[in-house]
C-alpha cells in the first residue's frame, strides 16, 4: 500500500507593506521617492558618525531639489534609549515635520520608528512594550540603511533601552513597517571592517534564528534561507575587499530579506540574550549576536539537525555522505570559522560581559518572547548555561544542560515580550 506523506502547516498571515527601492546611487533620488508619499517636510534621524562621514550630503541635495523642507536630528546612540526617542519626538513636533527619514544603522532606524510612533500616540514609548499596543498610525517612516545588518527597514518592530532598568525592550506593531526602504550600496562602501563583520553576522543571526523558529512559516523560511545563502556568498568578500559593489548590494538585500523573515517568525535565544547584553553593558547588538550565535546553535542542535544541515549547504559546505548530526556540526563550525576570520571574539568575556550580574542577565533574557519560539525548549537554567559557556568560549556540554541552577530558579517561566 502506498503511503502518502502528510504535511501539516500552521495557519499564517504574511504582511510587509514596505516599498523597496534598491540600486547603486538610488539614495540620490530620495526626494522624489518621498514626494510620492504626499508629504512636504521630513525629519532626518541619524547619528553624528553618519553625518560626519558626509553620507547625508546627496540625500539633503535630493530633498532640496524636491522642495522638501527638512531638519536633522543626529542624537542617536548605539542601543538607543527611550530618552533619545522622547527628545526626538519633541524636536519633530516643534518643527512640525510630516514624516521621519532614518539614515544609518539599526539604531537610527529604531529611533526613527519610535519618534514616528510617538508623534501620533499619547504617553511614552515605554508604555508600548509588547505586541500590538500602538493604536494610531505613526507618521510615514522612510529608512535608508547604511549598514547591512539589522534589516529594520523591513520589520514591524523597534527596540528601545530603558536606562532606568538597563533593559532593552521591544515594541511590535504592524504599523511600524516603514513605508519606503531605500537600499544604496554606495553608502556602505566605506564602512570599517569591524562594522561590516558585526552587522553582516547580525543579519546572518536573524536569518538562522528566523529559519529555525517555532513560528517560522513557508514565506519566512524562504526569505531566511535566501538570506543565508546570499550572506554566505558575500559577507567575507565585503569584509576583505570592502569596495566590491556587487557584494555590498547583495548584503543589503540579504539583510532586508532576513528582516522581512523575522518580522513574521520572531527570533530565538541569541536575541533574547544579546538584548540583555545591550541593556546592561551597552555592547553593540551585532557583535553580541555574532559572538553568541555558535553557542546557541550548539545548545539548539538536538532540535535542529535537519535545519542545520540545510543551513550548512546554503553556506557552501559539502555535506554529502554525512549524517544529519555531522552535517549540522558543519553549520556551527562554519559560523565559528567566519567569526574567527573576521576577528570577532570567540567568547563573550572579551566583549565586556561580567558574570557578577548573571542572575539579572538570566532574568532579563527570560522576559523575551524570543525564548518561547526558540526551537529547543529553554529554561532559565539553560540560559545561564549558554552564558557561562559563551563566557569561557566552551562549545561542549550543551546536551546535558537540563540542570537546576539555584540562582536562576526565579526566572524559570518566560514572559512573552519580544
Image: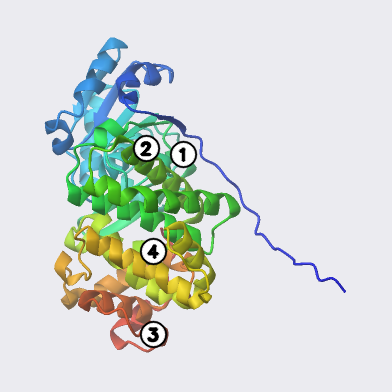
Disc 4 is placed on an element classified as: loop
Q: Which residue: 31% across, 72% down?
A: 363
Mark found first going from the N terminus, 1 or 3? 1
Spot occupied by residue 146 in the image (x, y as percentages of width and height)? 27, 37
Q: How many marks?
A: 4
Q: Toward the viewer: 61 or 381? A: 61
Q: Which residue is mark 1?
A: 175
Q: Which residue is mark 3?
A: 401
x and y percentages locating residue 90 in the rendered image: 23, 33
- Report, in whole angstroms, how far the alpha carbon at label 1 lies from the one at label 4: 21 Å
Q: Which mark is first along the chain, 2 or 1?
A: 2
Other residues around mark 1 within 10 Å, as few (<14) / some (14–19) / many (≥20): many
Q: Percent position (x, y) of residue 112?
A: 30, 37
User: Which numbered dot is residue 368?
Assistant: 4
Do the CB atoms of the residues marked 4 and 2 lie less than 8 Å apart?
no
Side of 329 where 215 appears, left or right = right
Amino acid at each position: 500500500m502506498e503511503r502518502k506523506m502528510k504535511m501539516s502547516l500552521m495557519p499564517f498571515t504574511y504582511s510587509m507593506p514596505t516599498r523597496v527601492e534598491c540600486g547603486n546611487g538610488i539614495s540620490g533620488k530620495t526626494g522624489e521617492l518621498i514626494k510620492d508619499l504626499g508629504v512636504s517636510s521630513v525629519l532626518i534621524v541619524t547619528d553624528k558618525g553618519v553625518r560626519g562621514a558626509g553620507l547625508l550630503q546627496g540625500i539633503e541635495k535630493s530633498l532640496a531639489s524636491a522642495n522638501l523642507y527638512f531638519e536633522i536630528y543626529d542624537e542617536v546612540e548605539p542601543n538607543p534609549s527611550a530618552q533619545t526617542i522622547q527628545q526626538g519626538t519633541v524636536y519633530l513636533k516643534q518643527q512640525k515635520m510630516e514624516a521621519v527619514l532614518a539614515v544609518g544603522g539599526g539604531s537610527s532606524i529604531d529611533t526613527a520608528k519610535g519618534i514616528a510612533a510617538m508623534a501620533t500616540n499619547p504617553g511614552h514609548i515605554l508604555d508600548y512594550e509588547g505586541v500590538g499596543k500602538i493604536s494610531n498610525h505613526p507618521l510615514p517612516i522612510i529608512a535608508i540603511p547604511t549598514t547591512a545588518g539589522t534589516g529594520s527597514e523591513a520589520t514591524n518592530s523597534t527596540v528601545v533601552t530603558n536606562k532606568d532598568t538597563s533593559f532593552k525592550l521591544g515594541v511590535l506593531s504592524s504599523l511600524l513597517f516603514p513605508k519606503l526602504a531605500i537600499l544604496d550600496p554606495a553608502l556602505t562602501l566605506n564602512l570599517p571592517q569591524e562594522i561590516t563583520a558585526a552587522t553582516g553576522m547580525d543579519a546572518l543571526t536573524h536569518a538562522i534564528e528566523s529559519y529555525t523558529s517555532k513560528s517560522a512559516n513557508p514565506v519566512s523560511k524562504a526569505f531566511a534561507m535566501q538570506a543565508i545563502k546570499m550572506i554566505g556568498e558575500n559577507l567575507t568578500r565585503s569584509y576583505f575587499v570592502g569596495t566590491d559593489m556587487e557584494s555590498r548590494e547583495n548584503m543589503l538585500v540579504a539583510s532586508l530579506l532576513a528582516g522581512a523573515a523575522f518580522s513574521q517568525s520572531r527570533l530565538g535565544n541569541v536575541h533574547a540574550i544579546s538584548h540583555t547584553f545591550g541593556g546592561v553593558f551597552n555592547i553593540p547588538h551585532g557583535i553580541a549576536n555574532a559572538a553568541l550565535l555558535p553557542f546557541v546553535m550548539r545548545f539548539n542542535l538536538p532540535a535542529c539537525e535537519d535545519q542545520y544541515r540545510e543551513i550548512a549547504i546554503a553556506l557552501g559546505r559539502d555535506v554529502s555522505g554525512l549524517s544529519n548530526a555531522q552535517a549540522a556540526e558543519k553549520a556551527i563550525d562554519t559560523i565559528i570559522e567566519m567569526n574567527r576570520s573576521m576577528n570577532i571574539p570567540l567568547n563573550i568575556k572579551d566583549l565586556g560581559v561580567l558574570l557578577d550580574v548573571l542572575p539579572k542577565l538570566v532574568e532579563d533574557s527570560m522576559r523575551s518572547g524570543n525564548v518561547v519560539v526558540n526551537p529547543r525548549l529553554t529554561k532559565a537554567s539553560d540560559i545561564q548555561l549558554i552564558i557561562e559557556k559563551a563566557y569561557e568560549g566552551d562549545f561542549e556540554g550543551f546536551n546535558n544542560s537540563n540542570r537546576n541552577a539555584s540562582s536562576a530558579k526565579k526566572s524559570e517561566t518566560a514572559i512573552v515580550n519580544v
